[in-house]
Amino acid sequence: MVATMGFGIKILATICYLLFFYIASVLIFTKGFLLKRVAIDNNSSCNVDFARSEEHGETGGCWMHSTHQRAIIVIIDALKFEFMVHHSDRMKNELPYVNKLPEIHNLLTQKPKHALLYKFIADPPTTTLQRLKGMTTGSLPTFVDAGSNFGSSEITEDNFIDQLIKRGKKVKFLGDDTWLGLFPGRFSTAFPFPSFNVHDLHTVDNGILHHLYTELKKKDWTLTVVHFLGVDHCGHRYGPLHPAMGDKLSQMNQVIGNITTLMEKGTVLFVLGDHGMTATGDHGGESPDEVEAGLFVYSVDQITASGQKHGDHKTISQIDFVPTISLLLGLPIPFSNLGQVVPELFDHCSWSKESHIKQVYHRVQALRLNALQISHYINAYMKISRDLPEELYTELQLSLSLTEDDLQKLVTKLSSHGKVEEVHLKFHSLEKRYITYIQSVQAMCRDVWAKFDLGAMTLGILTLLVAFVLTVYCIKISPLICEGKFPGSAACVFIASFVYIVHIIIQASFLEGGMVLFMAFILGLVDLGFIGIAIQKVHGDSKGEKFQNLTNRSNFELSQSFSFENLFNLFVITLSMAGYFSNSFVVYDSSISVFLTQTLILMASFKTVQEHLRTVQGTQKEMHGKKARTTSKVKFSNIVQHPVFLTLCLTAFCSLCICLTKNFQACREEQVNCINSRFLERLINLNSGEKNLRYFFSIVCLGILVLIPYLLLKHYGNLNGNSLPVLCMKYTIPLLAVFCALHWAVQGLPQNVLDSMPVWQQIVLPRIVHVFCIFNLLVFLAQPLLVYILPQNKSLSLPYGQSSEHLMHTVYRHIKVNWQDYFSNSKDKPPVVFGLGTVYTSGVLYIGTLVSLMLCLLLGDGMTPSVLLGWFSVLSFLEILSIQMKTTQDSRLNMLSGVLTFHLMTSVFFYGTGHQATIPSIRWEAAFVGFHGDFTNNIVPAILILFNTFAAQVLFTVLTPLILLWPYSKGIISSISLNNKTGKSETESEWKGDFVLFENEHKLKGTMMELMMYVILVNELQVLSAMCAATLHRRHLMVWKIFAPRFVFQTVSSFITFVTLLLVYLVILKIDSQLGKWLTKLYTK
Amino acid sequence: MTADKTPHSARKVLKRTLTWSLFCSLASLILLLIPFNSGTILDLVSNCLVATKMWISVILIQIFFICKSVTHSMPGKQQSKVGCLLKYVAVFLAIVTFFCVITILFGAPLTESRAETFHFAVLLSVAGTFPGLMTCGVNLDEWSRLYVLSSPEYGVEVVAYWTSLCSIFGAWLGAFPIPLDWDRPWQVWPISCVLGTLGGYIIGLILSSVHLFIKYYKMARQKHL
């Protein structure tokens, strides 16, 4: 028994080790892939210690004098720099987009101190939404703005629109409705137009033009934002080289001309593109074509003293726009801005024309405010996160404070004695120092936030590959474990992989780049090769051994493991993983997984029928020679009991269940013509007829869901006696179902009635269910054997033997054989034990029931039918498998196909419980089941939401051991076919159920290990393909919408699968050890 | 095998089947490729339903001729012609219903484009099971021997086996381009599946001729030895 426990713990350690590998690889990959930044919701205010606070004079503005009272921002989507700049050479004149904006060129040449043109570099990803965020907040783009609201795209960070609103100014908006998503309720007047239809070039633009000029003339605004989409859509549809682009740009030219004539004093105009476009008109990546947009600034007043040389256009970053417009309008710079003001726009002061020094001072002042704001932001950021390198940070802060001191000294000196030349030079050097500071902070943050770390990503993939190979190794040694041996190569493999993982972790957390990274790669590849050799060796060993023992059988097995069915199943799984590399396949994964699952189910059923016919053919040949063909009379009962017929019925039922999950699917926004399932609607929002119908339908489903395991356990004889778990199963679980139904009824009450109820009444029901489910689990863990020994009553010679035959499935023959001598002494009958034949199965079913009850509660009433469908499809598929196993008499073969089908079913039911692999589709309401929103920490809601989202993974992983156990424990339906095939009496007495696994002390562990390794293997493969897809498409237009969420969901889902698997394995180990103790007790008694 | 008993006639049968299947595959290939993207009635992309009907009849005629050329007699000759025919029609209808259900279970729309689903199911049952129906009749044992245990006798059954297998596999593969965002007209349900079925059918014909040719070659060598 000690040896057995030893093996159990060894396997447990192996799984933990693999889990550890998995977590390490995912974390390393994530470190390189997911750009993350903590969003700080602080706002800048006028009252800061480094700038004057209140507005004074007629110019107004805080922090600095505002030079303009109004601003117009004209965003022309995808306005490339090339479109704006004037080309003088003739050759290029042929191109349709060249020199189509002469208005800009005219203004630049005619009024060089009123108009400026810049090359405007966008940060990738060059998509409109990300760019608008950057252009209003001045922050760098990342995937996860931790702390911000996941549910909507609303900007919560400080931005200049909010600053304007806070100061009571009016903002007008016309154009792309993306803005309204980012700034809901901020605009005093808004004319949004849908941005969805890329083929439509004119609706948005013409809609804007219809209102634009009248709105501009009204003068009731401080800022007007106009967002034209025509150029972008034209690029998407025709590309930049199409004549339509020329027409569109000419139209925009006209717009710019009209606006400039309408402008009055004190108004500044910005014409800018949010990103560029490639030669084919697309955008999203980081090629120069995509990031080079243009910015054109124009004002009726003079805005710059220096001006630009003709044709010499400076390059600025897109985020530089934020501090510039803020200070021009006299606003505080948004708190989390990282941009640098454009100095040329601040060297002209209308009130101090005469002094050159003052102009320079003004410029330095703007830069100084900018630098101090950034320093404040970085300070605040450092307080909450450790992303940024500490040393560099202190160095930068030191240089800033030195610059500050120098500036103070210079200003005090300025009043005493003024050598103009010297002061001028000093100011210039100070200006440079401020610019250097801002740029180094920018570079530091960009390094951390906006760059994929390809080294870390590859290292993550490599680590997962090593884990994958390790898993294959574990699968290979599991037959040896079945025989009670532990191969010698295991220690070597363990050491090799351990050295690698330790190196990797040190590498990833303490060292950066260079030789060490290279070493890690070499080590990883060596490890891969080494484990590969070990696998080969184990494979060869086991083959050789089997040749010695059973030559025929080994050949048979070898041919079977590469059978057509297995290869086809692997092909299907490979297809499902290859789908991760295509954005449309990820989008339609819900339909594709249904398709593939149906294929696997049909394949399994075909295989079953084939095996059956083969064996029938074989036996017929043996019995009657070649020509005999049984033309027995067709009897109805014969047909019904025929295994082929049963298989077909089960297949049809299982397929139907899988197909019906489509009614519960949610839509993601990329899916066209998709309607959200009605079952996703909250009960409260339905009209009364539909409400009642759905409520009662859900309750019926819940009832059936609770009834099925009960009936199964009763059938197996596990519900005899009065032990606590049995009583729980009999009474508490139905009661909990009733509580669950009552909770839904309460939730279905009208909102005002619900609100008027005290809080405790709203949350008491789900809390009872939560608590009692956990209580039941604990009870089960304390007493995990659902068996019942019939009391030895001498007067009752054959207890229930003849009368209730179905209770006698579990006549305990094993003990009779082993302890016959002992019992024959005392002249006793062998003890009669109910439920021993399904001792493991019953445990899994019991836990499955509890888990699905909790999941139903979390998923809500609408999704309960889907959970029921999950149970139905699992049970019918298991029945198919057990029919197959009974005909082939070999349990090892169907393990792979079972695991693969379970895996695909998991994905079907992930979608079938109303989820999608996107962040907006997370169902946040799950956090409020049993809680009223008064969370002290985030752990409880996080767990609830996690369980809701990955309900399918949890349920199916809990039921996974049934793949192994079910064929032993004789399903109801497959037993009918078995009865038909062989004599009844024989099976009754011979049947030992899954207790057969206990007889051989290593068999359970070996096969369980193999099963779990297959599950881990498939999940690792899936994560691996998601990782590779994310790496490959890291510059894809849709990476943050499709591939990155897919990767995140896959990682979390696999993690949950692993942890659940581990827990289920622990439960089975517990049952196993308890069974051992129980048997010794029985023996001594 | 039974063919070995009378090598001469067996070889003749093989040769005939081989030429017929080669001829049919060529004819189908030409029929499939020439009107493609032409916008005519025979074009699958623009006139899916009509073209599918056309293809159903083409395949029916081809298989009928392949079988007729070799066997000269329909299976199930004991019964009267009418009763036999009725039986076949009933079985065929059942198969069509079966494929309709399968198609919907695999994810075809239930409410919209029912005509398309039906046509596809008919095509699939013609290409996938009609050869079997012609060779095995309505005998379940024969069916299970041919398809489940996959041991076709040399001759027409090889053609039946390969065309059925490849047609169904082709139809299955044909579903994969549907979700892609290429915006091509043939990505609409069920055109790609129909194309897949037809492609599978043609490949099945070619494969069966290869299979038969190898067998024929072996037999010829045996004779020389």
Image (spheres, rainbow, N blue to C red):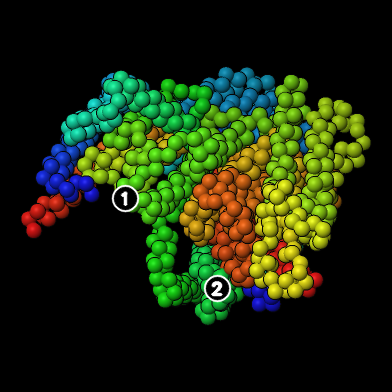
Residue A174 versus residue A951 in the image, above or below: above
Indicate the amino acid at tag 1: Lys
Query: What subunit carries mark 1?
Result: A
Any part of residue B54 in sight: no
- x and y, in percent, of residue A681 in the image: 70, 31
- x and y, in percent, of residue A809 in the image: 67, 53
Residues A142 and A1080: in front is: A1080
Residues A877 and A1066: in front is: A877
Task: Please tell me how crowded label 2 is: few (under 14), some (14-19), or many (20+) other residues with Cα within 10 Å.
Answer: few
Furthest toward the left, the residue is B224
Residues A650 and A471: in front is: A650
Separation (CA) of disc 2 from disc 1: 40 Å
Q: Quadrant of residue A23?
A: bottom right
Q: Residue at x 62, y 19 (%)?
A: A214
Q: Quadrant of residue A1004?
A: bottom right
Q: Residue at x 70, y 74 (%)?
A: A821
Query: What subunit carries mark 2?
Result: A
**Residue at mark 2:** A483
- x and y, in percent, of residue A377 in the image: 72, 54
Q: Quadrant of the C terminus of chain A?
A: bottom right
Q: Residue at x 35, y 29 (%)?
A: B123
As helix, strand or loop, the secondary structure at mark 2 comes to loop
Q: Quadrant of residue A1020?
A: bottom right
**Residue at mark 1:** A626
Residue B21 left/right relative to A856: left
Q: Residue at x 62, y 46 (%)?
A: A972
Indicate the amino acid at tag 2: Glu
As helix, strand or loop, the secondary structure at mark 1 comes to loop
